[in-house]
Amino acid sequence: MQEWYRSRALYEAVLKLVNSGKTGEALQMADGIPDKVIRSKAFSHIAVEVARRGQDYGEALDRAIKAALDIENHDESTKALMSLAFEFLNLGKPDEAMRISGYITDLSNRSKVEAEVALALAKAGKVSEAMEIINGIMDDDVKTWAMSRLASQL
């Protein structure tokens, strides 16, 4: 229980550092968070905020992905990766969302991220790219859902 409280305190400190623009210090502090789920959330928050500001987020994103993969509980790891992918999709970075989806080992959940990326691309007028992604979706139910959503958006 002590580890969780310490992790939460460090997480709050990381948020304050990021909000004040001290990304390097935030990354360093996030490394010291003992709880792997909270550490993953911290790195994800840093990566998203750095990207939102239009700064170079490459290192922060790589560390966020690694932190999510370090979570022993497979479901929690998948949830962290999906959340990170959707955050980057919401920032208008579908390529990054697709890259993150490649680390999701659960076929259905990876397919869901890919489908959302495809639909975002279709909305942006990139229909052929969207179709290419949909055709590559391995989960047939998600592929069918994405295809019907795409058809309704055109």
Image (cartoon, rainbow, N blue to C red):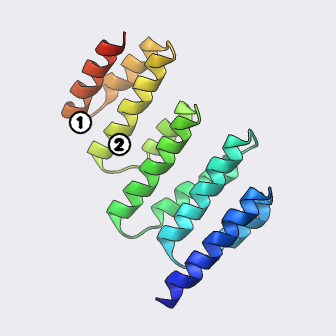
Question: Which residue is painted at 29% across and 25% down in the image?
Answer: 146
Quarter location, residue 141: top left
Question: In which quarter of the view is residue 130 placed?
Answer: top left
Q: Residue at x 46, y 61 (%)?
A: 69
Q: Position of residue 145 (x, y in %)?
A: 24, 27
Instruction: Identify which amino acid the numbered label 1 is placed on.
Output: Asp
**Residue 125 screen position, x and y as percent:** 50, 12
Residue 55's x, y, as percent?
A: 76, 42
In front of the other: 19 or 119:
19
| Quarter assignment of residue 23 | bottom right
Circle 2 packing at 10 Å, graded few (<14), some (14-19), many (20+), is many
Residue carrying label 1:
139
Name the foreground residue: 11 vs 140.
Answer: 11
Circles 1 and 2: CB atoms closer than 8 Å:
yes
- Name the residue furthest left: 141
Badge number at residue 11:
none
**What quarter of the picture does the C terminus occupy?**
top left
Query: What type is the residue that disc 2 sits on?
Result: Arg
Q: Is residue 81 above or below residue 122?
A: below
Residue furthest to the bottom in view is 2
Label 1 crowd (10 A; few <14 / some 14-19 / many >=20): some
Pointer 2 residue: 110
Could you tell me which secondary element the residue under label 2 belongs to?
helix
Q: Is residue 139 left or right of residue 132?
A: left
